Amino acid sequence: MDITVKRLSQEEVTRLLGKDESHFLDFKAIEISPRSVSKTISAFANASGGEIFIGIDDKMGPNGEEKEWRGFQNQESANALIQTIYELSPLGNHFEARFLSSAANNGLVLEITIFKTREIIASSDGTVYLRKGAQKLPVKDDAAIQALKYNKGIVSFENELTDGEEELITNSETVIDFLIHVVPTTEPETWVRKQRLLREDRPTVAGVMLLADEPQAILPKRSAIKIFRYKTKEEGEREALVFDPLTIEGPVVELIYTAVDKAKEIIEGIEKLGPQGLEKVVYPKEALHEIVTNAVLHRDYSIAADCQIRIYDNRLEIESPGELPGHISNDNILTEQFARNPALVRIANKFPNAPNKDVGEGLNTAFESMKKLRLKEPIIQEGENSLVIVLRHESLGSPEQLVMEYLDSHEAITNSIGRELTAIKSENTMKEVFYRLRDRGLLEQVPGKKGSASAWHKPHES
């Protein structure tokens, strides 16, 4: 087996040994058994992927527990471990492996990068594991295995049967209006059965979400959108709520459009400090629309939680229940496609006012539209049971550029105004921006103002 060797600098070694074990990272001694390695690989592959470094020990140092490099004598010494890895993934498409060497440290460290997989990977003894934080947990009972299948998108909760009557989706105003505009020559019951939205005379989850007039009556706690407005820049506390959370309900297409319109209305009531003074916060509507659409159509409906839109003074957060499905990760979410709820995505696209007109282009459109308004691109955060996309009220301009634009229409700028303008949190970091502009001859300190009142302005011409 030809595995490459990468030589690390001492700085790279120091950084590696300074890392802590986490949801994405694990360290093992060279004595670890192939069976134990297979359990860790299973756990990472079934979660979000991760890295294992074999050949790094924990030891007690003067400042407590620390890491020590103690690698394999040669590549052949790791053959049993490498063989186990290949047995778990014969095609080698679930992982990458390489050895790490260092001039100042003995032996080779085996680095294994495990990718998030579409399928469930079991360890060599047949047990399925899942990474949670810095530990691996066995997944044994049927309910837990089924939840993992939903999470990975192997099976979709959208196909589950509900307790609703068939009339909910065969005689609703939503289905009648839809068929009049899309398939006027067919009967509702015939069409929904053909689309597999009705089985055993019971509507599926997808059928209820798409065609029932009030899906929330059948699917409470997992079919609405909650909108929160917090008068703060910090994490939302009840005391910071501007009003009681709004609950948006209705069939999926109506749900998306109503939530986007209401969120946009609330956002446009926020003002932020800009180069010209207080300005209305503006997001491109297509960015908000595409992210909300993605949150609703691709969420995990097996999780009893509503989508949430949280509006803060400096950002907007859209949370969708469920982790990224299949092989999708933060790194490839803009280039790869995987529909957790294919029926929901496909049939929503048939509506005359389809929210997902360009299937597969949603988040790309959101990122591009943010760039056009010179706003920073969205942040994608994957939590334990949800995906959060954050839109910030921050310009793409550098702090220096924003300061100089502000002084085009204002006499002076203080540190607090500068931090509000640039979203810099540290007072000292903001001072460094002013100092850089001063050193270029673009700013000078306002005479006579010191301490918290100190301010900067453009140099006055003689």
Image (tube, helix red, strand yellow):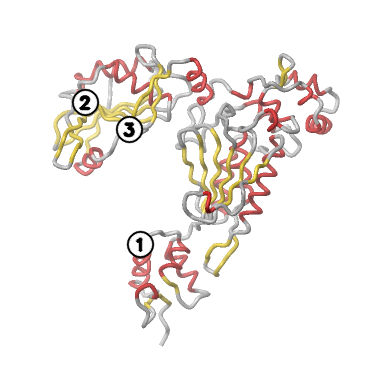
- For badge 2, the amino acid type reads Ala
Task: State left or right for residue 320 relative to residue 57.
Answer: right
Q: In the image, is residue 128 above or below residue 312?
A: above
Q: Nearer the viewer, residue 196 or 163?
A: 163
Farthest residue, direction top: 125
Q: Residue at x 67, y 26 (%)?
A: 206
The residues bearing labels 1 and 2 have C-alpha atoms spaced at a distance of 41 Å
Question: Are there few (<14), some (14-19), or many (20+) residues within 10 Å of tag 2?
Answer: some
Q: CA distance from mark 3 to mark 1?
A: 31 Å
Q: Secondary structure at mark 1?
A: helix
Of the residues under marks 1 and 2, which one precedes in the sequence? 2
- Provide the secondary structure element on which disc 2 rests: loop
Residue type pointed to by label 3: Leu
Q: Amino acid at mark 1?
A: Thr
308 left or right of 461 in image: right
Q: Which residue is mark 3?
A: 25
Looking at the rendered structure, which numbered label has been put on residue 406? none
* Quarter containing the N terminus: top left
Question: Seen in the image, is 365 located left or right of residue 236?
Answer: right
Circle 3 residues within 10 Å: few <14, some 14–19, many ≥20? some
Rate crowding at label 1 as few (under 14), some (14 to 19) or many (20 or more) other CA atoms within 10 Å: few
Which quadrant holds the C terminus?
bottom left
Q: Which residue is mark 1?
A: 429
Q: Estimate the x, y position of residue 47 in percent, counting from the top left.
A: 43, 27
Circle 2 is placed at which residue position? Answer: 29
CB atoms of marks 3 and 2 within 8 Å: no
| Residue pictured at 37% horizontal, 27% vertical | 114
Image coords of residue 293 (percent x, y) = 63, 39
Res 301 quadrant in image: top right
Residue toward you, 150 or 285: 150
